[in-house]
Image (cartoon, grey):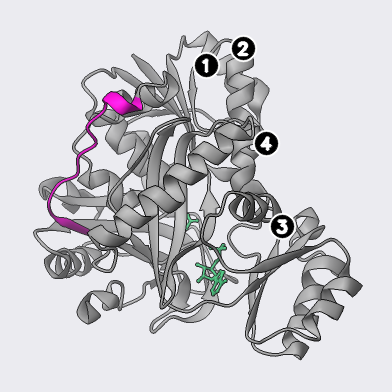
């Protein structure tokens, strides 16, 4: 069959790598893809939000299945556009992707269906938000309602910072229309875990767990980024916590979406915090995580197409989802200066070394091909993933492999997976 993958980052390269392993697939297209994806798929220069062009392309090429990976097109209705044209697409429709697209919606859903999460209030008026903050406990968390590239969350230590945050989100519109509404939420402390789960709208089956490192600098310092590295599984996500989450979070969320007339078909990403008072939801996303996919998918034993088709056809209950009994670590190689200001266009060398090593992957995030050379083309450039029999081995392997590639201004964190030592 023919498969089209929409997106251009490290997550999409990981998805394309899994699709390429499927015995059922004989042709892969990617829109727009990147230099790494181009080794496995035919890349077409269509943007992820150009639904008309994407649908026309899929029709012209008789694509059997389109996988919509990023949040923006999902929230804007990419899957609806494919379905309206009679084409099969994997991912939630817009009315379900709202679970990521609006924090106010997802918090309301959790409250209504008794899913554990931080206490919160929603505001669409800056003065009312500030009046609320004047009597609140600090630190406190401000969240822009809409999509903000993972950057719309401000943790404020006192009233002064919180007032500046309200101004930034609601008045100065730092995150655009995402800041028309805002959620103010109780600050929680604990270990964070990301759990991606396949759902067919009725059944939800979690994949192996992972942990992201969102801050730019070692020791979790510096600005928030799209993610500087991940490891899987999380040693803190015990069987007991997994059982609790299945019943109190995943099943409840999928049943709630169905009851609201918004069946969720696709990958539900739950950001969890394991607190002293129990495990609570930080956020829901409507897609694979980036760079979570880069450590979760290489460990999946199933044929990804079988699982995705089962989701679309409402037959996920028949799938025995299985993961390897090992571990994986992904270290992101970024351009120095990310996430603020960085140069691009530098040649990347050493990529071929990965082909000689089983269990090692170099997922491209921001790269492009130019005259047969691979050049840096973004803040996050590559995601170097390695497997190992346990987390410590996987981490040592991943850091060893980061030395195989070179480019000017190469920057990485040196402490990805440091929580492993505390487990
Ligand atoms: P979110 O996009 O909602 O996952 O938020 C991004 C990051 O902000 C999370 O990964 C947490 O590190 C942090 N965060 C979000 N909500 C809270 C909260 N209620 N308490 C503490 N930290 C939070
Ligand atoms: N790694 C976090 C995310 O994909 O949202």
- Residue 198, above or below 22: below
Find disc 3 in the rendering and name its residue. Answer: 145
The reply to whether discs 4 and 3 touch (Cβ–Cβ < 8 Å) is no
Find residue 394 and report its horizontal and vertical position in percent.
Answer: 16, 63
Residue that appears at 63% across and 49% down: 109
Mark 2–mark 1 contact, CB under 8 Å? yes
User: Could you classify mark 3 by the number of other residues whose Cα lies within 10 Å: few (under 14), some (14-19), or many (20 or more)?
Assistant: many
| Nearest to the observer: residue 248 or residue 225 | 248
Distance (Cα) linking label 1 and label 4: 18 Å
Which numbered disc flags the more N-terminal residue, 4 or 3?
4
Mark yes or no: residue 9 visible.
no
In the image, taking residue 318 as reference, residue 114 lies left or right, namely right
SS assignment for the magenta stretch, majority: loop
- Nearest to N terminus: mark 1 or mark 4: 1
Q: Is residue 261 left or right of residue 207?
A: right
Where does the N terminus fall, quadrant-wise?
top left
Residue, disc 4: 76
Estimate the x, y position of residue 375 in percent, counting from the top left: 42, 53
Real-space CA distance between mark 2 and mark 3, rounded to the nearest whole angstrom = 31 Å
Real-space CA distance between mark 4 and mark 3, rounded to the nearest whole angstrom: 15 Å
Bounds of the magenta segment: 316-328
Sequence-wise, the earlier of marks 2 and 1 is 1
Q: Name the residue under label 1.
A: 58
Residue 151 image label: none
């Amino acid at each position: 069959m023919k498969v089209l993958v929409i997106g251009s980052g490290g997550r999409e390269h990981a998805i394309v790598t899994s699709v390429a392993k499927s015995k059922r697939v004989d042709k892969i297209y990617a829109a727009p893809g990147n230099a790494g994806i181009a080794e496995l798929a035919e890349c077409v220069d269509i943007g992820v939000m150009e639904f008309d062009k994407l649908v026309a392309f899929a029709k012209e090429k008789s694509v059997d299945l389109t996988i919509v990976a990023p949040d923006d097109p999902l929230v804007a209705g990419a899957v609806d556009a494919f379905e309206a044209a009679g084409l099969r697409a994997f991912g939630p429709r817009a009315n379900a992707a709202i679970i990521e697209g609006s924090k106010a919606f997802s918090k309301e859903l959790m409250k209504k269906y008794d899913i554990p999460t931080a206490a919160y209030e929603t505001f669409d008026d800056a003065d009312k938000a500030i009046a609320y903050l004047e009597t609140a406990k600090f630190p406190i968390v401000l969240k822009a309602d809409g999509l903000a590239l993972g950057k719309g969350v401000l943790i404020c230590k006192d009233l002064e910072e919180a007032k500046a945050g309200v101004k930034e989100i609601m008045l100065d519109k730092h995150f655009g229309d995402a800041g028309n509404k805002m959620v103010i939420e109780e600050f929680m402390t604990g270990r964070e875990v990301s759990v991606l789960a396949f759902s067919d709208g009725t059944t939800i089956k979690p994949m192996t767990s992972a942990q992201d490192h969102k801050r730019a600098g070692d020791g979790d310092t510096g600005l928030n980024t799209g993610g500087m590295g991940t490891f899987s599984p999380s040693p803190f996500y015990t069987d007991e916590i997994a059982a609790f989450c299945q019943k109190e979070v995943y099943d409840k969320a999928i049943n709630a979406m169905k009851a609201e007339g918004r069946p969720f078909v696709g990958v539900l990403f739950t950001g969890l915090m394991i607190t002293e008072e129990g495990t609570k939801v930080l956020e829901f996303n409507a897609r694979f995580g980036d760079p979570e996919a880069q450590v979760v998918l290489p460990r999946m034993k199933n044929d990804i197409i079988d699982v995705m088709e089962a989701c679309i056809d409402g037959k996920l209950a028949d799938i025995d989802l299985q993961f390897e009994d090992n571990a994986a670590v992904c270290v992101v190689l970024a351009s120095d200066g990310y996430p603020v200001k960085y140069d691009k266009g530098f040649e990347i060398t050493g990529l071929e070394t990965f082909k000689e090593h089983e269990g090692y992957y170099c997922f491209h995030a921001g790269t492009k091909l130019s005259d047969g050379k691979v050049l840096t083309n973004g803040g996050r450039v590559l995601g170097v993933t390695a497997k190992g029999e346990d987390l410590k081995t996987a981490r040592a392997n991943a850091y060893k492999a980061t030395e195989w590639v070179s480019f000017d201004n190469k920057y990485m964190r040196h402490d990805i997976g440091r929580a492993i030592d505390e487990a």
